[in-house]
Image: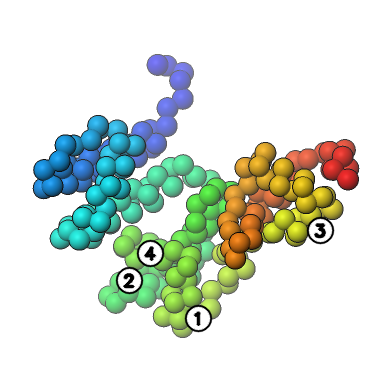
């Protein structure tokens, strides 16, 4: 309808996701002689999840992985177009590749950082593989500029002078991203700072 906002890039990404998942689901259903799922993204993804072990052993597993990875990258770019910080790192380490490696850091969304080649999308390294990649490149990455800081409840309580109980309440209310390590919970620094930047002084004093 005229005047109604329409995100063409999002529509294209969704159509591509539906097409690719539908194609792979159709192959699985035919070769395994099972009923095909409903043609919706949720149903197709769930179907492929149930057959992932079989698909991982299939001769076409690499192609399926590459296509799905490309879908993820495209969807991230559409969903978070203005929240990506890019850091150039140097030439790609893969033999015969003339591309450049770029770190993509999503600063405000729950998307993990990733280093990938600007020529071949198959050349990509998630954050947990960066140390190995830096060894292959023979250089140390500027990790302070690439990685996200995570704060414990005790850190937040001390830095912003609020009771620990208020930290947990705010984390729940504001839906801070979190991760657990060694049975301790840590919160995304960007989310924490955003919350306190928005709070009024009177609200802060109310926690004491």
Using the image as rendered, state which of residue 39 and residue 71 is in the foreground: 39
User: Which labelled disc corresponds to residue 124?
Assistant: 4
Taking the image as shown, residue 103 lies to the left or right of residue 186, namely left
**What is the secondary structure assignment of the residue under circle 2?**
loop
- Looking at the image, which residue sits at the far bottom? 138
Counting residues from the start of the chain, the first of labels 3 and 1 encountered is 1
Residue at image position (52%, 63%) is 87
Q: Is residue 181 left or right of residue 198?
A: left
Q: If you read the primary sequence from the N terminus, does the residue marked by circle 3 or circle 2 appear first?
A: 2
Work out whether 196 lies above or below 153. above
The residue at which mark 3 appears reads as 158
The answer to whether one can see residue 84 in this image is no
Q: Is the residue under label 1 in contact with that under label 4 (CB below 8 Å)?
A: no
Alpha carbons under labels 2 and 1: distance apart: 18 Å
Q: What mark, if any, has residue 125 been given in the picture?
A: none
Q: How busy is the neighbourhood of tag 3: few (under 14 within 10 Å), some, or many (20 plus)?
A: few
Image point 63% across, 47% down: which residue? Answer: 176
Badge 2 crowding class, 10 Å Cα cut-off, few under 14, some 14 to 19, many 20 or more, is: some
Q: Nearer the viewer, mark 4 or mark 1?
A: 4
Label of residue 98 in the image:
2
Q: Is residue 168 left or right of residue 35?
A: right
Q: Horizontal and vertical percent for residue 22?
A: 22, 40
Q: Nearer the viewer, mark 2 or mark 1?
A: 1
Residue labelled with disc 1: 139
Residue 116 visible here: yes
């Amino acid at each position: 309808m005229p005047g109604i906002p329409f995100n063409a890039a999002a529509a294209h990404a969704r159509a591509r996701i539906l097409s690719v998942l539908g194609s792979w689901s159709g192959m699985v259903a035919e070769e395994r002689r099972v009923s095909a799922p409903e043609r919706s993204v949720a149903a197709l993804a769930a179907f492929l999840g149930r057959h992932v072990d079989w698909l991982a052993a299939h001769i076409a597993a690499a192609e399926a992985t590459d296509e799905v990875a490309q879908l993820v990258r495209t969807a991230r770019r559409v969903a978070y177009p203005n929240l990506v910080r890019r850091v150039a790192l140097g030439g790609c380490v893969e033999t015969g590749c003339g591309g450049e490696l770029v770190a993509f850091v999503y600063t405000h969304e729950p998307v993990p950082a990733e280093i990938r080649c600007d020529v071949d999308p198959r050349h990509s390294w998630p954050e947990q593989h960066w140390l190995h990649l830096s060894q292959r490149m023979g250089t140390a990455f500027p990790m302070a500029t690439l990685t996200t800081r995570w704060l414990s409840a005790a850190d937040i309580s001390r830095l912003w002078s609020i009771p620990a109980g208020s930290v947990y309440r705010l984390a729940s209310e504001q839906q801070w991203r979190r991760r657990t390590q060694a049975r301790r919970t840590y919160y995304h620094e960007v989310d924490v700072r955003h919350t306190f930047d928005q709070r009024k002084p009177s609200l802060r004093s109310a926690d004491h």
